[in-house]
Each structure stands twice: as C-alpha cells, then as structure tokens.
Amino acid sequence: MQHPILLAACFLLCAVPASAQDADHNALRNHNADWIQAYPEKDTTVIKRIAADDLVMITSNGTRLSKKELIRNVAKPAAPITSATIDNVDITVKGNIGIVVAQVEFIMVVNGKETTVKNNYMDIYEKRDGQWVAIAAHVTRLDVK
C-alpha cells in the first residue's frame, strides 16, 4: 500500500521541474519571437536585451558578427525587412543551455523589388544570473524568391 504523504511529496517534487522547464521554454520562445520581430521593427533595444556581450553570430553568407555589429545591422539593414514569419520552432533546454532551432521567412526590399528570403537558424542561449541570453547564432539561407 502506498502512503498518501509519499504520493503527495512525489507529486510536488515532480511538478516543480516541469513548471520550471515550461518557464524556460516560454522565455526562450519569447526571446526568439522578439529577436526576429526586431528586424522589421529595427528595434535594437531587443537585441541589446537578448544578446550576451560575447555573442558570436554567423550570418547566412558566412560573416561573423559580434553583438555590436548585429545591433548595427538591425538598425541599418542592407535591405529593408518589411515582415518576418517564424515557422517550425524547436526548443531544447539542457541545464543552463537552451537551443532554439527554427525557420524564418523575411519579406525584404532589394533594389526596389519585394523579395522573400527563407532561413534556417540555430540560436544558443545560456542562463546567466537567472536570465536567458543569446551566446551564439548560426543562420543558413534556404532559398530566395
């Protein structure tokens, strides 16, 4: 026969990690959405908040960017981005490391013509002092229409 107090204790102990994991997944999902929407909105405050000072980002053309360079690119993009749509988001949390893998479709204006650009990307986050910050990112261009 199982003891009711043991069952209650097990339930409470098992419930805590799930809610903490849900909170981490939600925080990473929100960071992901905020980061992508920062591009069409040219919102550098979002990037300043999300990106760690030691962030390293590899762009779709292989360029390596620091946080400072990323902020500059968001503020003054080479081609204006009018919209961004995120798809296929997968989030994994392993201790204090979070991994976001997703696709994004950007609508941008290149040489006066609207163009669709699709990318796969992976962002690596680290939980520092209780806050998730992006420490690495890699982008791969899928196609251009």
Image: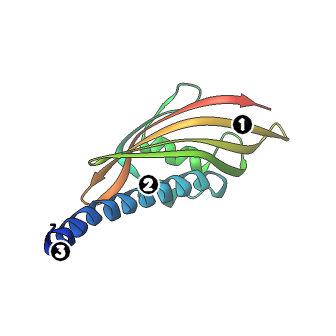
Which residue type does callout 3 highlight? Answer: Pro
N-terminal-most mark, 2 or 1: 2
The crowding category of the residue bearing disc 1, from other C-alpha atoms within 10 Å (few below 14, some 14 to 19, many at least 20), is some
Which dot, 3 or 2, sits closer to the camera?
A: 3
- Do the residues under discs 3 and 2 have CB atoms within 8 angstroms? no
Q: Secondary structure at mark 2?
A: helix
Q: Nearer the viewer, residue 13 or 36?
A: 13
Q: CA distance from mark 2 to mark 1?
A: 23 Å
The residue located at (42%, 60%) in the rendering is 27
Residue 129 locus on image (x, y percent)? 24, 59
Q: Is residue 144 above or below residue 87?
A: above
Residue pictured at 34% horizontal, 57% vertical:
21
Q: Toward the viewer: 62 or 5?
A: 5
Q: Closer to us: mark 2 or mark 1?
A: 2
Location of mark 2 (residue): 28
Left or right: residue 1 compared with residue 132: left
Q: What residue do we see at 29% from left, 65% from top?
A: 15
Disc 3: which residue: 4
* Neighbourhood count class around disc 2 (C-alpha, 10 Å): few under 14, some 14–19, many 20 upward: many
Whichever of labels 3 and 2 marks the residue nearer the N terminus, that label is 3
Q: Amino acid at mark 1?
A: Val
Q: Is residue 78 above or below residue 31?
A: above
Instruction: Give the number of the disc on residue 117.
Output: 1
The part of the image, by quadrant, that contains residue 119 is top right
